[in-house]
Structures are given as C-alpha cells and as structure tokens.
Image (cartoon, rainbow, N blue to C red):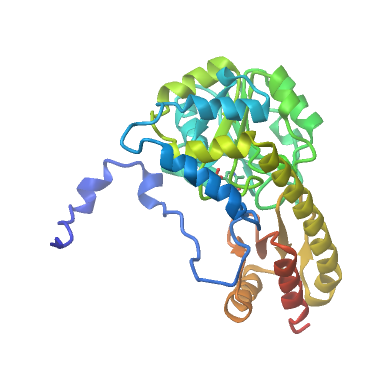
Amino acid sequence: MRYSPLPQPQTEWLQDFFCDGLWGGGTYTIDRTPCRIKLDQNEASWDWPEAIKKSILQRCQEEPWNKYPDPYVNEVLDAVSQYSGFAVDNLIIGPGSHHLLCLALSIFRQRRRGQLVISRPSFPLYESHAKNFGLEKRIWPLTQDFEFETESLHDLPAHSYVVFASPNNPVGNVLAKEHLEALLQAHPHSMFFADEAYFEYSPEPYTELVQRYPNLILLRTLSKAFASAGIRLGYMIGSQPVIDMIRKVTLPYLVNRLAAVTVQQLLTDTTCLQRMRQQVEQTMVERDKTIESLIPIGREKGFCVYPSHGNFFLQQWEDAERARTIYTYLRDECSILVRDVSRGPLLDGCLRVTVGCPEENQAFVTAMRALAS
Ligand code: PMP
C-alpha cells in the first residue's frame, strides 16, 4: 500500500510556526554523482582492514540488539577519556561532532547578552544552523590571505559566544595557540568554541589551553583521522559546569550499540591507534607533496593553492565561474569529485580538495596538468 502525498497546508498559516531564517533556508546538499576518486568530504583516504572489522563485527553480534544501550554509553565515554586524556566529567559524546555543534549552538542561543560570533570562511554549517535557529550573528572574517585576525574582536561584549574551527575547514589555516590564549584572557566572560575536527593533524591543538581556561570548549570527531565518518562519533571537551548544562539537553541512547562497540575498539586497541597515527603522518606527507607539485602548475594554469593543516587543501581560481568549470571537468571527464565552495562567502573561485591516497592525489595533479593554459 502506498499513500498519495499528504495535503499541503496553506503556506501563510504554516510560516508563522518558523523563524524567517528557517523558512527561507535550504537543506544540506552534496553532489552524489558516483566518481572513481572521491575527494569532496574530507574523509580519510583509507579504511580499516578487514581483520579489524571482522573482530569488531563479531563483538557486535554478541550484543543484545533488542535491549537499549546504556543511555549515555559510559563505556564509550571511558574510551574517549582514555584516548583524549580528559576526565569523563569534562566530556560529552554524540553521533558525530556536527550533532554536538548543533546542540551547543541551541543551548547558547539562550544567552541573554553578548553576541554570537562566527568566523568566515569556515565550516558552513555554523552559519546555516545559526540562521535556522533565527540567531543574529556577527561575522569574524579571516584576512585576505585567509589568516585569523584577532584585533577585530577587541570590542567583543561579555557573554559572547565565538565559534571557529582550527584547523579551519575549508582553508586549512589555524588560529595560533598564543592568539587564542590572548583572546581567552581578554574576554574571560565570553565562551570560545573551537571545532577541532582535524585535531590529529593540528600543529597547535588546544589540549593544554582547555585545562586552564573554563571559557574554552573543544569539539573533536572520529570522522577524520580515525577513518570512521560512517560510524558517527564526536565528542566535546569543556569545564564541568558547561558540560553539565549541555548534558541536560543531550538525548539518551544517541550512540547505538554497534557504534559503541566499534569506537571502543578503535580508541583503545594499540594496533588501531598505531595505524591511525601512521595514516595521519602519511596523509600529511601526501598533502604537502601534492601542494608542492601543484604550485608550479598553478602558476601556468591560473590557480593558487593554500598551505593546509588538515587532510584537505584549498585551490583558488580567478572566479566562481572558472572554478565551476574546473569542478565539472574533474567530475565529468576525470571522475574526480572535489567540493565546489566557490559560491560561499569570501571563497570566490575556491575548490576544496581532500587529500586522497597517493594514486588519487597523483590523478588530481595529472588532471590539473592536462588543462589548457
Ligand atoms: N567540523 C568540521 C570543521 C568539519 O569539517 C566537519 C565535517 N566535514 C564536522 C565538524 C562534522 O564532523 P562529524 O562527521 O563528526 O559530524
């Protein structure tokens, strides 16, 4: 039995239930064209070996699927605590860091004073969630060279909430630890939310800062360095009163038994940890090598490439139209999918390219070389 589509209510009546931002906004979309080489989502270029997957699956089979898991999956929290070094009272886990980011935005929207500040260009979901929640925001722009600039925050009112990523997607730049520390000291009554999704690649992680500054919250994930985007697990690190507040709005049972078993093994098994670290090293070497080969090609073909501290890099063409042409050429003629971010604010002409395995990176370089000058 298939039902016909449900009757549509009148939009004028319906609209009043939603804020303008949500009503006028769009949904998250990505190009799902099947391609041989997928460099569009900053996923790890490698997957876990079959033997490891098999042993995890065996343990999944032994789980009672008919029973709810622990509401807040304490055993996963313990594993995250062991890996990250932070006490469980300073941690929250959830099905992906994106979910936690949304939770943190929703809770801090109840702030009665201060501003919501979002860096730009950055992970676009910060701005789209703010819009969907009807939040007014102040943009914290990077410089023309895509660097963080902290002077412009000198007038930040107390109780502000500042959201940024470091390493920053899609640029790959970082906010230096000493600059963040200066901000944390200058604005002790504002909250800084640092998205460290690419933490394992970062030359300047904020691990030590969060131990000293209660106005800093960190967000991390297993989706990138741990090659587990499909498993969905992220975690947030913060002082206990902040974490306690966020925990109150965290739904129970968000992390399922199968993800819990998987994550526990990946985070605690020394072979898995070693493999992850090796792969991170290799990805960084590949990234720098690929960027190095692209620089002279770019001079000839009319693009530049920015240095990066993530598992991706940004390529900039003269304008959005040219970037779109290159994007389509890569997808349709080379079967390489990258991310077209060229229409994003302050990203005119930019494509974001994930670092793949050596053959994939080589294919990308070859595709660039083959372009007419
Ligand atoms: N933050 C940043 C900066 C990201 O780039 C991404 C994913 N591309 C996320 C968060 C979301 O990660 P997750 O898979 O943990 O939801």
Compared across the picture, whether 333 is left or right of 259 comes to: right
Number of numbered discs present?
A: 0
Quadrant in the picture for residue 198: top right
Compared across the picture, whether 27 is left or right of 11 comes to: right
Q: Is residue 256 visible?
A: no
**The C terminus - image quarter:** bottom right
Identify whether 276 is placed above or below 183.
Answer: below
Going 80% across and 71% down the picture, which residue do you hit?
298
Identify whether 58 is placed above or below 107.
Answer: below
Counting from the top left corner in percent of width and height, residue 336 is at 62, 72
Going 50% across and 37% down the picture, which residue do you hit?
261
**The N terminus - image quarter:** bottom left
Q: Going by the picture, which residue comes out furthest to the bottom?
A: 372
Q: Nearer the viewer, residue 123 or 148?
A: 123
Counting from the top left corner in percent of width and height, residue 370 is at 75, 82
Q: Is residue 292 visible?
A: yes
Q: Nearer the viewer, residue 270 or 349?
A: 270
Compared across the picture, whether 235 is left or right of 24 comes to: right
Identify whether 241 is placed above or below 196.
Answer: above
Counting from the top left corner in percent of width and height, residue 323 is at 65, 70
Q: Going by the picture, which residue comes out furthest to the top?
A: 241
Going 75% across and 38% down the picture, which residue do you hit?
175
Compared across the picture, whether 275 is left or right of 229 comes to: right
Counting from the top left corner in percent of width and height, residue 288 is at 82, 57
User: Taking the image as four quarters, which one is ligand 1 found in?
Assistant: top right
Q: Nearer the viewer, residue 358 or 33?
A: 358
Identify whether 169 is placed above or below 342.
Answer: above
